[in-house]
Amino acid sequence: MLLKRGYTLDIVKNSMFSKIYEVDCFQKEFKKMTKEKLAIKPPYPRYQKWLIASLTILEEYGKDAINLENFEQLESVKPSIYSIRYPKSKLNPRVLYVYLENGDILLLTAFKEERKSDYTRNIKMVKKRLKALDA
């Protein structure tokens, strides 16, 4: 649990998947980024549909998803940080995640990439979250 500005940051299981977890502010960050109201059941808004499809691929392929077009490894640090991209959209959303030791996936943040500094800022935040969660 990470204490951040008066609230705690916990890891919660994503109810749609068996191997995917997220920090509890992930959904809020995703909603803020997309400006879409997230749906509990279909039909899903455009970017939620993209996220569900991407997470389905990620859960099925695991680390081999890195060989697919919209998945990339960002840094060669322990643990490695990965990104899911949707570059051909106006929003240009990104989701940063890591693999846990048992092979599960932890979604750490969602943001829109407008310039390279957006990655730099969010990677720093992800590292702080990982460090605090590891404590």
Image (cartoon, rainbow, N blue to C red):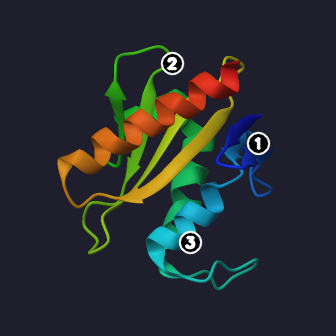
Q: Residue at x 34, y 60 (%)?
A: 86
Amino acid type, callout 1: Asp
**Amino acid type, callout 3:** Lys
Which is more toward the observer, 131 or 98?
131
Quote the CA–CA distance across marks 2 and 1. 19 Å
Residue visible at 64% across and 26% down in the picture:
132
Would residue 68 be seen by someone viewing this image from the given angle? no
In front of the other: label 3 or label 1?
A: 1
Q: Position of residue 89 (x, y in %)?
A: 29, 71
Image quadrant containing the C terminus = top right
Q: Is residue 94 visible?
A: yes
Considering only vertical position in the picture, is 69 above or below 34? above
N-terminal of the pair, mark 2 or mark 1, is 1
Q: Please state which of the two labelled residues, at mark 2 or mark 1, is closer to the viewer.
A: 1
What residue appears at the point 62 percent right and 65 percent down from the top-left corner?
Answer: 28
Label 3 secondary element:
helix
Secondary element at tag 2: loop
Q: Look at the image and tell me in which quarter the N terminus lies.
A: top right
- For mark 3, what is the residue? 31
Mark 1, other Cα within 10 Å: few <14 / some 14–19 / many ≥20:
few
For mark 1, give the secondary structure.
loop
- Name the residue that disc number 1 marks: 10
In the figure, 71 relative to 1: above or below?
Answer: below
- Residues under labels 3 and 1: Cα distance? 18 Å
**Residue assigned mark 2:** 79
Mark 3, other Cα within 10 Å: few <14 / some 14–19 / many ≥20: some
- Left/right of residue 101 with respect to residue 85 in the rendered view: right
